[in-house]
Image (spheres, rainbow, N blue to C red):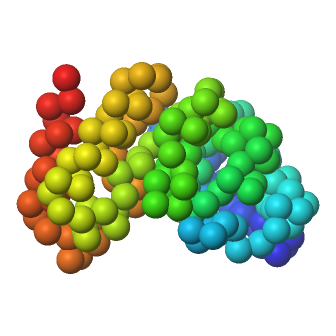
Amino acid sequence: MRSYVEQQVIRAEKNTRFLSGYGFKYFLGGGDFASDQGPMFSPKVFRDLILPGLKKVSAICHKYGGCHLFASDGNLWPVAGALFGESGIDGYYEIDLKAGMSLEELRQEYPELTLLGNISSWSLSQGSAEDVKKEVLSCLETAKKYCGIIVGLSNYALPETPLENIDMMLELLRNQN
């Protein structure tokens, strides 16, 4: 695992240096490492093996004038302090409401972290139009209450998602005033 993380840092240095030369400012990273029950490895493994590399990647992004955005769905609370507080990342996307990652709690705990997402892909694909409306409006209400939140789909629209639900979400997002 340590070798893999070290290779990711080397790759981040090359990619960030190259892309920043073309004006890129937002560097996306991360990877799914948690389920609804929590991370697939212990907080100690995260702290010992993953966190040092994440800190290096964040420093690289900052060195080139960029922001490091990290993605993972699932329940990240067991490693949240290290991931959102110590790693140096600037933003978190794929925020998974169904796994307990709420915008309100994240904003209160990590006021400097930019938050993106929180409308559940599952709710969009499996819920009723009323479920979608309730979830989107709840996310928008939180975003209006705090700064640094971009409301959107937590991951992607699943192939079986009813078009009516996508239309409902987009209409609510467009008319958020």
Which of the two residues, 164 or 115, is positioned nearer the viewer here? 164
Return the x and y of residue 127 as percentages of the image width and height: 24, 65
**Residue at image coords 46%, 54%:** 97
**Residue at image coords 31%, 62%:** 123
Q: In this view, does 52 lie above or below 63?
A: below
Q: Is residue 39 among what the camera can see?
A: yes
Return the x and y of residue 104 as percentages of the image width and height: 51, 36
Q: Classify the position of the N terminus by image quarter.
A: bottom right
Q: Classify the position of the C terminus by image quarter.
A: top left
Q: Is residue 60 among what the camera can see?
A: no
Return the x and y of residue 176 as percentages of the image width and height: 21, 30
Q: Left or right: where does residue 21 sit relative to residue 64?
A: left
**Residue at image coords 77%, 72%:** 41
Image quarter of residue 125: bottom left
Image quarter of residue 141: top left
Return the x and y of residue 30 as percentages of the image width and height: 61, 59
